[in-house]
Image (spheres, helix red, strand yellow):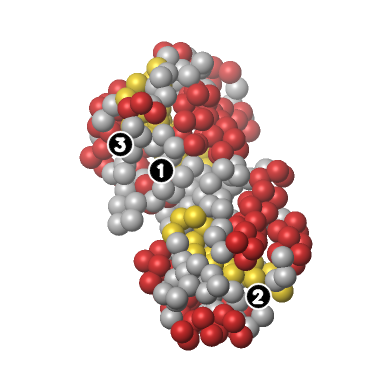
Amino acid sequence: MVNSDAPLDTVTARQSHPRLAVFTDPEELDVSEGRELLERSGFEVRVLGTRDHSEIIASASSATAMVIGYTRVDEDLIAAMGNLAIVSTMSVGVDTIDIEAAVRRGVWITNVPDAASEEVSVHALSLALSLVRGVGFLDRHVRSGGWATDAAESLTRPSQLSFGVIGLGRIGRRVASLAAPIFGRVLGHDPFVADDAWPTAVGRLSLDSLLRQSDVVSLHLPALANGEAVLDGERLALLPRGAFIVNVSRGSLLDEHALIEALDAGQVRGAGLDVCATEPPALDDPLRRHPRVLMTPHLAYLSEQSARSYALRAAENVAQWARCGRPHDIVSKGHET
């Protein structure tokens, strides 16, 4: 039964076209199981391997379902794909999608909330420990001919340090639980978590108080809607001198120019980054070249297991919508059929 609130021309278009599902930009993810699931669910499936809107429209303008990696889905793209009913992301984040435009046009938006919590949390802690123990920097020192006491690093005992977690969702909580046996204190900030749901082993502080008391700070937030940084120059200045920063969430959360200044001044001793404001960063980007930065290529989420899980769960959302009119992991509602 078609939702009577859906525009008549949209309903007619959706009824008169066979269902087509398109994977736009799976990149390193394995879509084979997801593709098979959608084909068993009655979809024609195309794998495009592009984020380019003109290529997507040329190849799949009649698609009912889009399964995306990092493709930007704005109002123009939604409008150009007249049969589009659901956009399913192969990620937790949905910041590449114009949610308001999707809601206006009755398009469902879904995500994959828990395919790689283990991978991302372990990656964050790995970066933190590599910074504290100087692993990456010492490796560079040895490879350039240094050895032993030639190392310039001031190494630190983790049990003497406070570990601050900004954002206590699935991944932030897991990072906190992993850090607790290693660091002296684990502190947290998240205004959206109720007191009765707050992890007992994590001290609850305001953001500024957490920054003043944390020797290591790990970011676990979605991008802010206005694109502003959570850690700008003023907030980096609140940190104890010689603190460390870890970001495996979104590059926009950290003011990169302010970070470079803080690194050069010694206010921040080192940064471990899996994400950048622009990806990939230019070859001459100061973050790529900075000796106090450890950088990985936005792969904190990736493992053999998660590469399959992301694409499969995203496809399951589409298949569930096709079968029941509602997907599993709803970010915003579309027209019900």
Residue at the extreme front of the image, as rendered: 1
**Marks 1 and 2: which is nearer the front?**
2
Q: Amino acid at mark 2?
A: Leu
Q: Earlier in the sequence, mark 1 or mark 2?
A: 2
**Marks 3 and 2: which is nearer the front?**
2
Mark 1 vs mark 3, CA separation in Å:
12 Å
Numbered disc total: 3
196 vs 45, nearest the viewer = 196
User: Which residue position holds label 2?
Assistant: 20
Mark 1 vs mark 2, CA separation in Å:
33 Å
Q: Crowding at label 1, few (<14), some or many (≥20) Cα neighbours within 10 Å?
A: many
Do we see residue 141 in this rendering? no
User: Which residue position holds label 3?
Assistant: 191
Determine whether, in the image, residue 191 is placed left or right of residue 1: left
Q: Earlier in the sequence, mark 1 or mark 3?
A: 3
What residue is drawn where x is 61% and y is 85%? 16
Q: Is residue 44 above or below residue 320?
A: below
| The quarter of the displayed image where residue 271 is located | top left
For the C terminus, the quadrant is bottom right
